[in-house]
Amino acid sequence: MARRTKLKPAEIEEVFRRFHQANPHPQGELESVNTFTFLVAVVLSAQATDEGVNKATRALFKAADTPEKMLALGEDKVRDYIRTIGLFRNKAKNVVLLSKALIERHGSQVPSSREELEALPGVGRKTANVVLNICFGQPTIAVDTHLFRVSNRTGLAPGKTPLAVEQGLIKSIPEQYLLHAHHWLILHGRYVCKARKPECERCIINDICLFPGKTVAR
């Protein structure tokens, strides 16, 4: 008999009921002072930890918290602020270019549509989804490595690509939980359902999860 890899609708609803009960108002861990700096922080967070990004951006955002100030700062100085972050050279270039684009195309405001966000330098689908969710309250799902792992392990939304997982989650998660689903899954993957050694003994959905490699049974 083949192993089941996809949770049933009632099981998915119970997963998110428990997440909601445990943490009704989950918060992201990237620090920012406004929508523009949040966008920059998300761009910088690609292949980097939120903690590492926060350490670099505290000083950067004191110096430049608007597209105009960031553009005036220039690529070399932005690079100096963020050199502790992975891929800092390319990211500094993109931050300055997206600042310029915001000034020229959007009146220095961060746009609230996926298409306009993805047209900005350094902004892909995942970044756009995070900004749409946190800054504009849209029920989007940004699939990073944590969400991809948790969705496949648990059976919430098995998929071979981030887009397949995103679409599976959007289709499967009950509407009342969609807005915060992205945060719950990131936090679960970051602190409980870890890549190398998941801490199944303290997982609140252990009895529902379909992962065959559980470190403890419940």
Image (cartoon, grey):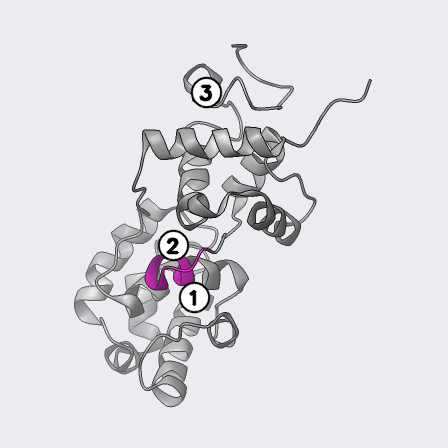
User: Which secondary structure lies at badge 3?
Assistant: loop
Image marks 1 and 2: residues in contact by CB distance under 8 Å: yes
- Cα gap from disc 3 to disc 1, whole angstroms: 34 Å
Q: Residue at x 43, y 66 (%)?
A: 91
138 relative to 204, above or below: below
Please count the marks in the image: 3
212 relative to 92, above or below: above
**Mark closer to the observer (3, 1):** 3
Residue nearest the viewer, comparing 101 with 20: 20
Write down the region rendered in magenta: 131-139
Image marks 3 and 1: residues in contact by CB distance under 8 Å: no
**Mark closer to the observer (2, 3):** 3
Choose top left, top right, bottom left or bottom right for residue 101.
bottom left
Pick whichever of labels 3 and 1 is earlier in the sequence: 1
Q: Amino acid at mark 3?
A: Glu
Predominant secondary structure in magenta? helix
Q: Residue at x 54, y 33 (%)?
A: 12
